[in-house]
Amino acid sequence: MGNVFGGKSRPSRVTEQDKAVLQLKQQRDKLKQYQKRITLQLDKERLLAKQLLKDGRKEKALLLLKKKRYQDQLLDKTENQISNLERMVQDIEFLQIEMKVIEGLKVGNDCLKSMHQIMSIEDVERILDETHESIEYQKQIDEMLSGALTQEDEDAVLAELEAITQGEDVTLTEVPTEPLPDVPELANKEPDRRLKKNMDREMLSA
């Protein structure tokens, strides 16, 4: 019938290696269960053999011990198989990790190649040269400005910088270059004479 909602099924994230690891682990677990069951059975048969010897049934006890010996050998083989399965699982899981590392290195290598294609060595050298030229040009401008300003200009610049730092908008006034006119000395003394005459008149009238 297909998908009921008509959407595409998502691709499975389980890889063939994951399936193989799962199967190996399932086989290992079954062998361990078999090993545990046989071990319990051998313990019972050992006790049974002792009981048979006490009862004088030596041949039956001997046959039971032979069977036990055979099952002991099976247990040894089972232990070897479990070890092989566990080692195989570890090898596959380690190879999966190595594959992820290799894929990561491949992606990184492709990224570096694309970046090298975008910017070649010549481009880097050109940018460095342009940056060096810009720095040298700015240094020349700074030297020219520092040599052209007088001490008074330097003080005015520092004062404006201080005002800007404090958040004030300062408009510098132009300093007049023409000398101020001389004030006649007579004009300065005239108000004093008038004041003196008025004081004399007041004293005489009193």
Image (cartoon, grey):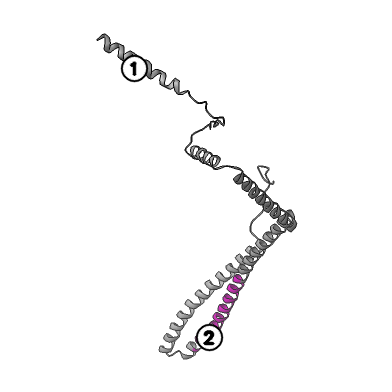
Specify the amino acid type for callout 1.
Answer: Lys
Q: Of helix, strand and loop, which one carries label 1?
A: helix
User: In which quadrant is the C terminus drawn?
Assistant: top left
Specify the amino acid type for callout 2.
Answer: Arg
Camera-side residue of 105 and 174: 174
Q: Residue at x 45, y 23 (%)?
A: 185
Q: Which residue is mark 2?
A: 69
| Residue 116 percent coordinates (x, y) | 72, 57
Q: Residue at x 67, y 62 (%)?
A: 103
Q: CA distance from mark 1 to mark 2?
A: 150 Å
Q: Is residue 72 magenta?
A: yes
Residue furthest left as drawn = 206
Q: Which residue is mark 1?
A: 196
Q: Which residues are magenta?
A: 62-90
Q: Is residue 4 left or right of residue 56?
A: right
| Residue 32 percent coordinates (x, y) | 53, 73
